Image (tube, helix red, strand yellow):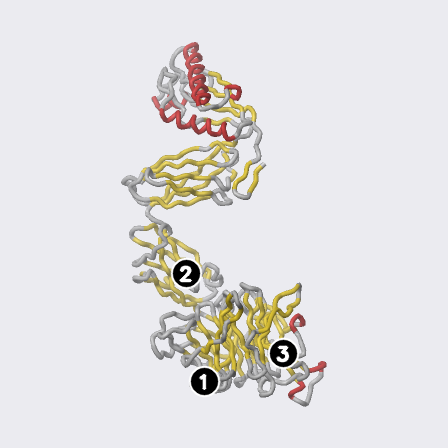
Amino acid sequence: MKAKHILVVIFLLITFSGWAQKSLFDAVNMTIDTLAINTPYSDFGPAIIEDELVFLSFSEKDGKKSDKPNKVFYDLYSTKLNAFGEAMGDRTRMNTVVSKYHEGPLTYCKNTGELFLTQSNWENPQEENMVFIKKNIRLGIVIYEKSGSRWSVKEKLPFNSSEYSVAHPTISVTGDTLIFVSDMPGGSGETDLYYTVRTADGWADPINLGPKVNSSGKEMFPFLNTDGSLVFSSDGLGGAGKLDLFYIEFPIRASSQRSTFAGEVNSPEDDFGMVVHPNQQGGYFASNRSGGQGSDDVYFLRFEDYVFDVIAMSSKTKEILPGTHVNIIDEEGRVAASGSTNDEGRLEVQLEGNTKYTLVATNEEYMEKILDLDMADKTGFVDGNLEVYLDPEFVFKGQVVDIMGNVPIPDALLMVSDGTKLDSILTDDKGTFTYNLESDKKYRVDVSAYNYFGTEIEFNTMGMDMGVFDYLIQLYSLDAGSRIALKNIYYDFGEWSLRPEAKRELDRLAKVLEEYPDIQIILESHTDSRGTDEFNMDLSNKRSETAADYIISKGISARRLEWVGFGETQLVNECDGSIPCTEEQHYENRRTVVEIRKSKVTRRAKGNIFYF
């Protein structure tokens, strides 16, 4: 593409009645660039297929220039596009879709993989190389599908006719609504725009788009943009010259209005065939205006601004959040846009394309949300809008990992209970999770994962300031050799009876032993340093035996368990009697540890995923 900018334009909205839907083209700054792909002949009908710009161009029969116009016919050519939608490199003839007929314009549906191509002479092959303006030659639309590296015919539209033309298709993103041009009987003028819907029974009868679009003149070259705009050309609706470009929302409603592109997008000559790149950063159109290289040339439209709505929503309820304040800051720290969302949770924003920003959204009952915006990448936009989800006052988030090396555990299950309801969360491939909490609630979270000994977490939001409960949850594997410090298996001083919280942990252990029948364990109990060595050794044996008896009472075979006491020989801190210690420090030493003596991972299924 040439670096030369031939003009700068501003899209102005010419109103006829209120348009309910905002269009990409409303008040957007744009520049127009010439392209190196143009020739002295006619080049027009741009379309975008994946990463290529496809267009029509006169082709010399047998590679030789002909003195007779009807010996020259249209073929399809293409050139590569970069990430910004700019044409790069030389033009190449598309040998994958070439025939002896006139070809194009066309449209491509990424969703279905289909190519909708205008072809002449599709019914009578004996009539060769005659252009569209010849009244005795009709145009029809043929649907192609990819077969290897080439395109092959799939079907022809059922209302193609030898009595009139059907041409210039544009297809909806879903592939079920086709708009086209035809001079079939019953229209408003020379050529009208029609639409048809594809159902299970095939393509429905065409419906005229009506007086908001069609005039007594020619309406041609429609294009359906992803923002809901239908762009087309007409010479019967008034304007700057012959064929001019217009747009209107589609589907067309009673409140819909037609708008035109003011400024120099429309010239005194023909301006037609506009398409917009999927990134909504620019597009292409054709014109035979002065200053070009040939009769018709293809021009690049570079969108300098991007207009969209920020929609603030609750990440918990998905409801809109009116009154959310939004600040958008550029890379220099300047405020590029600021305001609050309206009653519909929306704030209209206009930003420069190909620029990076930081968005900050705040709402009184929600936590601050910060997003990085790269306007060269529109993948985060939904229907041309940016949805911003704010988290409630409290969020439970974190990561579940293997305690040996903090390796992430995907698909770990977290059961979250607030006493009235129970929710489940699965960790992602990085072991991370997020869950929105409510204020003034007590929570208990049970964490489990395949081939791991689970755990539980308790916390509450009673009287707390808003914030994040961020946890690194470490689990012990059930492999042989693992040593698991059982949580809450503590004892009162000098006692060996189980506390209530200890029973919950032993219930978890019994469940693991039931689920993994090949596991064998040894229970090790410990005391603090107070009391004689003999007393502590006897006490620890009693504690270990008490824990084993409880597990056996849950139906676990005694042959799978061993139990032993170590007294005060393996303290976990320095409280050996030589220094003063708190009761809490002594409490840490009164514990039970499980060692996995034998383990064999058994074949289990989770959904369609099998573990071995």
Q: Secondary structure at mark 2?
A: strand
Q: Dot 2 corresponds to which residue? A: 386
Give SS at disc 1.
loop
Q: Position of residue 444 (x, y in %)?
A: 37, 36
Q: Is residue 118 above or below residue 238?
A: above
Residue 122 got which mark?
3
Which quadrant of the rendered structure holds the C terminus?
top right
The part of the image, by quadrant, that contains residue 139 is bottom right
Q: Is residue 69 visible?
A: yes
Pointer 3: residues within 10 angstroms few (<14), some, or many (20+)?
many
Q: Which comes sooner in the sequence, label 2 or label 1? A: 1
Q: Are marks 3 and 1 in contact (CB under 8 Å)?
A: no
Q: Can I make out residue 239 in this image?
A: no
The residues tagged by marks 3 and 2 sit, at their Cα atoms, a distance apart of 45 Å
- Nearer to the camera, 367 or 538: 538
The residue type indicated by label 3 comes to Trp
Q: Which residue is mark 1?
A: 188
Q: Front-most of 139 and 427?
A: 139
Residue 382 in the image: state x and y as whole percent: 44, 61
Q: Residue at x 37, y 54 (%)?
A: 318
Residue type (three-letter) at the residue carrying disc 1: Ser
